[in-house]
Image (tube, rainbow, N blue to C red):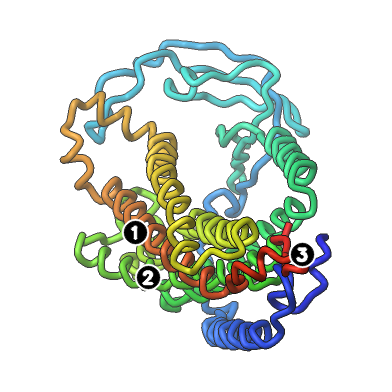
Amino acid sequence: MAHGHSHAVGDLDGPPRKRLGVVLAIIVSVITLISLAAMVSLWPDAGDIPRDRNPISGEGVSTVSAEVTSVEEFDCGSGGEGPDQLPTVDGNCAAVVADTDEGPAEFTLDSARTQAGISEGDGIELIRIQPEGQEVSYEFLDFERGVPLLALTALFAALAIVVARWRGLFALLGVGITLFALMKFVLPAILAGEPPLAVAVVGSTLIMIMLLYLAHGVSIRTTAALFGTLFGIAFTAGVGVWATGWASLTGIGAEDDRTLVATVPDLNMSSVVAATMVIAGLGVLNDVTVTQASAVWEMRALRPTARAAELFASAMRIGRDHIASSVYTLVFAYAGASMTILLLITAYQRDLSQMAATEEIGQEIVRTLVGMIGFVLAVPMTTLCAVALAPPAEDEDEAGGSHRRRFTPAS
């Protein structure tokens, strides 16, 4: 780690400013303690978390691994409209034989899955069904993807560590902390009936406090980024509640939403939508706040005599570029993630404005726009915090002297 990591809060970035470091440490500690107390009060009891029966883990039902040994297509009369008036895939079905630990397993694939592709040698997961007193039967569940997923994860982790070194390692550790917080607190608490928005704000606050200091070191610069991030979280939560009500988002836009409501009848899905807006915006919010704080520190190092207004104006020029690039980055990300829906819209030849007003698509649009509003406003707020907390400007005479005070931004 860089030398500055051994200093107290704030002494990464120049001559010691112990008084400011102590004040900021107290403020961050108070915020952390309040958030921890809120988390304790919202922490769900194990008995309050709904546990619906897994449809593939009932009596006589289990999953088994298998390897496809043969695939024979046959005409199953598919095509046209199904019972639900939706079009079905026109094409052959397939009779498949796969090898399991218990011997060969035979099952049938519908035309959609057959057209998607399945070949000899494919590793698959099957649902094994054997009611009491009856013969065993099998159904296709999914392909086995464990090896590719683990390989890609290992490749990404290795590259992150090689390129970013300690920062990359700490960032990966932060990902683990985030997943732990989501799986052990945020999701169980929401399922247990705690207010989804409060859970999301508390969880996001603690996650960001840990991630920022872990990945970027304990410094005044990181604290400036934290303040901007916390502002973004609070603002996104407030706008999210307002936008959810104004756009009449019920949270029931897809089949999975209906299944969730059936499993957890007391769940307020509108509040869940607002909560997802807070969590969904954390990544881009963290990105811009760290960038803005770093920009201010770098410019202070390059221009020790710059006044606060000059520093703010220069940093905002960087921030505006960041905003512009992030806007179309999010559009591309959404288009890629929703490509199936967009293709279906095009195939149906429906007007985009009509489809955008549907619950499923409108929810994603509102979530993205609310996150972008919080992100955009976090830029000037973070810049203000960073300018206020950055090392003070030097006098021209002092800066020109041979004994002038210099500092190096945190690496």
Q: Is residue 145 above or below residue 254?
A: above
Quick check: can you spot residue 113? yes
Q: Which residue is mark 2?
A: 235
At label 1, which amino acid type do we have? Ile
- Along the polypeptide, which appears first: circle 1 or circle 2? 2
Element type at mark 3: loop
| Residues marked 1 and 2 touching at CB (< 8 Å) | yes
Residue 24, by quadrant, is: bottom right
- Along the polypeptide, which appears first: circle 3 or circle 2? 2
Element type at mark 2: helix
- Along the polypeptide, which appears first: circle 1 or circle 3? 1
Where's residue 335, x and y in %? Answer: 38, 36
Element type at mark 1: helix
Q: Which residue is mark 3?
A: 402
Q: Which residue is mark 1?
A: 373
Where's residue 18, x and y in %? Answer: 71, 84
Where's residue 86, x and y in %? Answer: 26, 31
At label 3, which amino acid type do we have? Ser
Distance (Cα) linking label 1 and label 3 = 46 Å
Front-lying residue, 384 or 145: 384
Residue 268, by quadrant, is: bottom left
Left or right, residue 19 beside residue 324: right
Residue 105, by quadrant, is: top right
Within 10 Å of the Cα at label 2, are there few (<14), some (14-19), or many (20+) other Cα atoms? some
Closer mark to the observer between disc 3 and disc 2: 3
Taking the spot 29% from the left edge, 29% from the top edge, the residue there is 344
Distance (Cα) linking label 1 and label 2 = 9 Å
Front-lying residue, 265 or 246: 246
